[in-house]
Amino acid sequence: MEYPSILLITYIETLANISGPSETIDWLKDLGMTLFEKVEPQDFKDMEEFKESISKGKMFLPYFTNIPEIEDNLILFKSCPFYEALWNYIEHYGRFPPSFEEVIEYYREKEDIAVSPFCIIHRFVCERIGKKIKIGGKNLFITRLGSKSIFGEIIISKNKIKEKKLNEEDILELLKDFSCIYYLETK
């Protein structure tokens, strides 16, 4: 079903053209934060039970994408949850609108890593989901470490990788096979 995805991308493009990157980013954040607002909180006795729930597709995290893989404290998405929407647009128009790049560049300068405006939605969806989960009585925090575009462009958050005491080369190596990598921790 390609037309809803084309309409969403066209809406993002129109919003960016009329309101600029900052307003568009605010709208994308709000969308990501509200998508799972009504999801009931979940409690897990430990990280193993949480990981098992994801791997068996029983959790709401793989809501519209493939079931991610879990490796240590990393959650690895094989493909972008918005892959089909992005490719439908490319197949229809041949390229993304210039405003997409403006939004991405602005977001990278001001806030975080992204390879498409949909990365903004995905980040805030994951953060919202994390706020709904407790593991062993502690809150779950989900932090994006790296992303790969549908064209293969890779971007990582060097500061967050260093903060989590991980190796940049390991994350870059994983991004050869995965589109998004998030770090899971409880506090």
Image (spheres, rainbow, N blue to C red):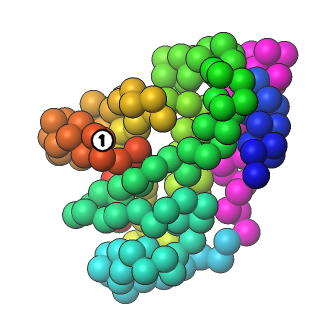
Kindly tell me whether residue 121 is visible in this rendering. Answer: no
Of the pair 152 and 101, the residue shown nearer to us: 152
Residue type (three-letter) at the residue carrying disc 1: Leu
Of the pair 118 and 86, the residue shown nearer to us: 86
Of the pair 98 and 44, the residue shown nearer to us: 98
Where residue 105 appears, as percent x and y from the top left, is: 53, 17
Seen at 66% across and 43% down, the residue is 85
Where residue 94 appears, as percent x and y from the top left, is: 65, 22
Q: Which residue is mark 1?
A: 175
The answer to whether residue 62 is left or right of residue 26 is left
> Secondary structure of the magenta portion, mostly?
helix
Where residue 163 appears, as percent x and y from the top left, is: 25, 41
111 magenta-colored: no
SS type, badge 1: loop
Above or below, 81 relative to 112:
below
Residue 120: image quadrant is top right
Seen at 43% across and 80% down, the residue is 56
**Magenta span covers which residues?**
14-38
Of the pair 168 and 186, the residue shown nearer to us: 168
